[in-house]
Amino acid sequence: MGQDQDSSFSSIDHIGIAVADLDAATRLWRDTLSLSFKGIEEAPEQKVKIAIFELGETRIELLAPTAADSPIAKFLARQGEGLHHIALRTGDCQAALGEMEKRGILLLDKTARSGAEGTHIGFLHPKSLRGVLVEITER
């Protein structure tokens, strides 16, 4: 994204996976796959509970709805369990959102908002990215 290092993407921050049963999915990823389990966090403003796993510098986030009208509940009803989004890490979420909009990418979030673990996040519309929902994450 140009020469502004703060708004460039440095790595995959995490992969978000929608699940219907967070406890069962957590057992699968923790006990069967033996991934390092960091814990469960709730994001009330997003109406989601998140089980967080670490794999090197990347995390896997299992996302379960806490309300029937949450985006994850709607995703599960439409598509079932599976890959929900890929998150790209940046040093400045708001600047990255602005840069993506300048480049013609449709934004779901024009302003960065609070995410899990004290992050700033914003989503890019999947219509602009060949059907892939992309989250921009600033730690």
Image (cartoon, grey):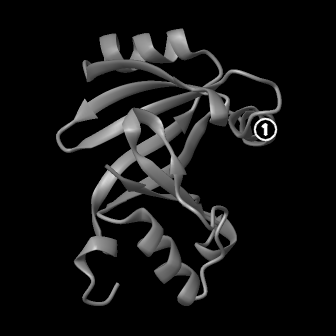
Estimate the x, y position of residue 87 in percent, counting from the top left: 43, 54
Residue at the outermost left position: 56
Residue at image position (51%, 78%) is: 98
Using the image, determine if residue 9 lies above or below residue 135. Answer: below
Residue under label 1, please give it.
74
Q: Position of residue 38 (x, y in %)?
A: 29, 21
| Depth order, front residue of 3/87 | 3
Three-letter residue code for mark 1: Lys
Residue appearing at x 67%, y 29% in the figure:
47
User: Relative to 26, is 107 on the left or the right?
Assistant: right
Q: Residue at x 47, y 82 (%)?
A: 99
Left or right placement of residue 102 versus residue 51 in this view: right
* Residue drawn 45% across the image and 35% down it: 116
Q: Would you identify the image quadrant in which residue 132 lies?
A: bottom right
Residue 128 rendering spot, x and y as whole percentages: 63, 76
From the viewer's side, name the closer residue of 21 and 105.
105
The secondary element bearing badge 1 is classed as: helix
In this orientation, which residue lies closer to the viewer: 31 or 54?
A: 54
- Number of numbered labels in the structure image: 1
Q: Nearer the viewer, residue 31 or 134?
A: 134
Q: Is residue 10 left or right of residue 50?
A: left
Q: Quadrant of residue 76?
A: top right
Above or below residue 57? Residue 97 is below
Q: Position of residue 102 (x, y in %)?
A: 55, 88
Say which quadrant the N terminus sits in. Answer: bottom left
Crowd class of label 1 (few under 14; some 14 to 19; many from 20; radius 10 Å): some
